Image (tube, helix red, strand yellow):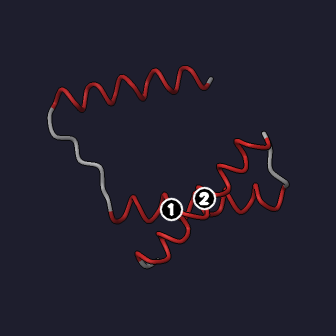
Amino acid sequence: MTKAEYTEKHTRMEELLALLTEKGELPMVLNKELDDISKEIATYEENNFPFEVESLKEMRELNNYQKNFSAFRQ
C-alpha cells in the first residue's frame, strides 16, 4: 500500500467510524468494509511505523497495561 492509499483508507475509516458513532451500528456491508480497512491500516502501520520502547520503565508499563487489558477482555 502506498502512502496515498493509506491516507485514503484512513479517511474512509474515519467516515465509517463517524457513521457508526452517529447510528450506533452499521449494515453488514459497511461493517465488513470497516474491518477490512482497519486490518489493512494496522498492517501498514506495523510495517512503516514500528513501535520502539525507549526505556525499561516504558517496557514494564506497557507489559502491565497489556496484562490488565487481557484480564479485562476475559
Residue 18, how many percent across, how many down? 66, 49
Q: Residue at x 22, y 30 (%)?
A: 58
Horizontal relation, residue 21 to residue 48: left or right: right
Mark 1 burial class by Cα count in 10 Å: few <14, some 14-19, many 20+:
some
Location of residue 74 in the rendering, given as x and y in whole percent from the top left corner: 62, 23
Residue occupying the point 32% across, 30% down: 62
Locate residue 43, reporting x and y percent. Answer: 47, 62
Q: Which residue is depicted at the point 22% across and 41% down? A: 53
Residue 15 occupies which quadrant of the picture? bottom right
The residue where tag 2 is placed is 13
Residue type, label 1: Ile
Q: Quadrant of residue 25?
A: top right
Do labels 2 and 1 touch, CB within 8 Å? yes
Q: CA distance from mark 2 to mark 1?
A: 9 Å
Report whether 13 appears left or right of 70: right
Which residue is tagged 1? 41
Q: Does residue 60 lie above or below 15 as drawn? A: above
Residue at (47% x, 69% y) in the render = 7
Can you say whether 54 is above or below 30 in the image?
A: above
Q: Amino acid at mark 2?
A: Met
Tag 2, which secondary structure? Answer: helix
Q: Quadrant of residue 30?
A: bottom right
In the depicted view, which residue is nearer to us: 68 or 30? 30
Residue 38 vs residue 11, the one in the foreground: 11
Of pointers 2 and 1, the one earlier in the residue sequence = 2
